[in-house]
Image (cartoon, rainbow, N blue to C red):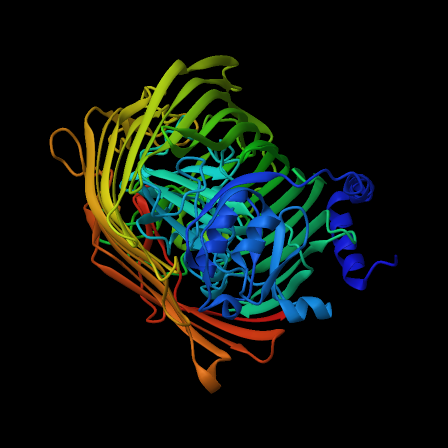
Amino acid sequence: MRSSPRHRLLSAALAAAFGTTFVSWSSLASAQASEQAAAPTFDIRVPAQPLAAALNELSRQTGAQVFAAGDMVTGISAPAVSGRLTLQQALDRLLASSGLVAVRNGASQVTIQRASTATAGTSLPPVTVQATADGTTEGTGSYAARSASTSTRMDLSLRETPQSVSVIGRQQIEDQNLVTLDDVLRQTPGIVADRLDERVQFTSRGFTLGTMIDGIPTFAFNTVAGEVSMLSTAIYDRVEVLRGSAGLLNGVGSPGGAINLVRKRPTSEFSGHVTGGIGSWNRYSGEVDVGGPLNAAGTLRGRFVASRTAGDSFIESKKTAEDVLYGILEADLSPTTTLAVGVEHQKTATDGANYGQAPLFFSDGTRTRLPRSFNSSAPWSYWNMYSDKVFANLDQQLGGGWRLKLDASYLKSKRKRASGDLNTFYPVDATGDSTIDIRDNPATSRNTSFDAHLRGPFEAFGRKHEAVLGFSYNDYDYAIDTNLAAPTVFDTRPLNFYTLQSFPAVTSFPYKSYTLSGQTSEKSVYASTRLRLADPLSVIVGARGTWYKNDALNRNQVAGTLTRVPGSHESGVVTPYAGIVYDLSKEFSVYGSYTDIFMPNTERDSANNVIPPQRGKNYELGIKGEHFAGKLNTSLAVFRTKQTNLPVEDTSAGLLPDGSVPYRSVPGARSRGFELTASGELAPGWQMQAGYTYHVKRDNKGVRLDPTYPNRLFRVSTSYRLPGDWSKLTVGGSVSYQSSIYYDEASGLGRATQGGLTLIGLMARYEFDKKLSASLNIENLTDKRYYSGLGGYNGYTYGRPRNVWLKLTYKL
């Protein structure tokens, strides 16, 4: 059989990422397809309900992806289906008398078609009913998420999860032009994004967030060699954000929660798009995304993504270029076995890059009030980030609804950075007298992670329950060098900062000052179970045992000394988890959850010693709603966190030997607050993601600990597709409000305050036909002048002024 042009296009793209690896995979998958065994059976229990909801429930119970056009299933009711059945048998019963049939696209993908269409041999373009069983959001057109596994490893709906979870899906990412993780989290309910320089720190409820990829915890972003905020969204289907302790799956889980980045997967039918755009400050972008089957049987599928975004900035002498490549192959080795392998590459290069911030005050205590375009680093400064990742995962169905999943990945990250930076910890005089730091700071890191877990149902006391048992391993090492242009411990020189942009370039750094290196490893076992004690009542209990080790070395090249930095060694630390969900009605549930906190610190105090691990407890109570057959999710939560050994910046001490800010340990921190969220379809064509959060964090003396973070946040993003003759046009936008913040300058020069801030964005998209569309996005419509970061390096960072993106997208 001759391959189609689409097969050849996708194969060529994947070959660019994998070389010729896919050829051997194709041969393997074809051989396995001819040896497929009998279809597996499942314990199916789907109650009578609307067909769209019934297909979603069947997806959840079997792990299959079920596709159908939304208008095809609207208004159709499905009968109750139960028993030990194959996927096809269950589908046949659900679709009986509906005029619809199920057409298999592979071992675990199904398209719902009208019987007359299927008989004629024509195919309909697949559109997901909501999200698929694994939570996929791409193609749904919805801001609502069907499920999320960030909290418990079980594919629970948001209503069934006894913690606060928000999911920013593919539709919202595209509508609001969220091109980096920083962009995403600035529109996520309850998340504060505080920009230091090129780095951004994300917090929830006053605490930092951990990071997961495809549900697997990673340490890859624990040092400057890997900056999580720079990650491109081009390769991700969605971003799941858990607020509250993530200790069950993250042995070193932050009380703030976790960010779970879920990759795009190959599609069962050929699909793709090409996008090009132009924006303010001479920016441009381009993206190619293609995926689909690579053999006639559909047992081998692939996907390839390539994107580039580049251009200038509103900051003087600053420009950035970002390049992303992603390739994944997915093979059905048997009807019950799927193997996926993939590669990722991202490079983010910034010229005129900032390290540190602009000064808030002159040495006489007056405010600096510099222009937004002020660059606190010399134009020859640069900050280039590189990351290369390979990963593989195996999904094995074991029968009886049980599945074994294995995930492994290896990531290598590198930073190249040299700069001349205005030092905001030294006096800055109104005449221009100041100090510049000159250094070369390359950094490298490697992260190896592995996770294996079993998940499935079991019966006890006449009811069906669910359990998860798993093991995870993380190993991370890093090295940060400091090289100087002069034979001193620190290369600091006098500067007139008004002439910083003409400061002579430094191109050679022959003097090695010091090297900070370290290694972190974690091994853990975890288990959880969801017990259905009664029809309306579910209890989730679990625990995690963690073995953790962190060591670091500081090599002083000038003095010729090697110092071991005190680290953290913990063995068999048990982190319990408990949650309860009670269904009040078909739409509403109340819940409560409790989680222990165990999080080793990497921050060091003024004596350069690592602060002891954070420990504490997290409580949460709330009510959740699931409306319009799952099209809209709502929640109200109240929370309280108690914690010891919380690291807080110690502005009274000088910088550490590596130039970083020291921290102090707070013995009795506590955070409390509440939040309201809603996500999904409010009315036909009207999508929304919204949230209001209040929190306050204080020490054991009642002193507020995070005045540079707002304690009130309101976020709403929305889009509306006009009806009737105007249906080609979609309009929308975003509103983000935060309450006032302040920072007391380290040397006592004064307090910088920013009042309540509201930022407005607008979007519009016009579909010329089924393939070609144009979109317009306007950020900071009213051109507010505001801080996107305050006090991180005793200074400030300005947020982006009003700017525009115009993009064209052509669907292949």
- Spot occupied by residue 460 in the image (x, y as percentages of width and height): 39, 28
The C terminus lies in which quarter of the figure? bottom right
State the residue at coordinates (48%, 37%): 212
Q: Nearer the viewer, residue 233 or 517?
A: 233
State the residue at coordinates (41%, 43%): 156
State the residue at coordinates (31%, 43%): 204
- Quadrant for residue 246, please give it: top left
Tally of marks = 0
In the orientation shown, which residue stands out farthest toward the bottom? 725
Q: Nearer the viewer, residue 269 or 303?
A: 269
Query: Would residue 373 be seen by someone viewing this image from the given angle?
Result: yes
- Spot occupied by residue 618 in the image (x, y as percentages of width and height): 25, 32
Say above or below: 298 vs 444. below
Say above or below: 475 vs 428. above
- Spot occupied by residue 85 in the image (x, y as percentages of width and height): 57, 43
The N terminus lies in which quarter of the figure? bottom right
- Spot occupied by residue 758 in the image (x, y as percentages of width and height): 27, 63
Please give left or right for residue 271 compared with residue 485 in the image: right
Query: Would residue 362 be seen by someone viewing this image from the given angle?
Result: no
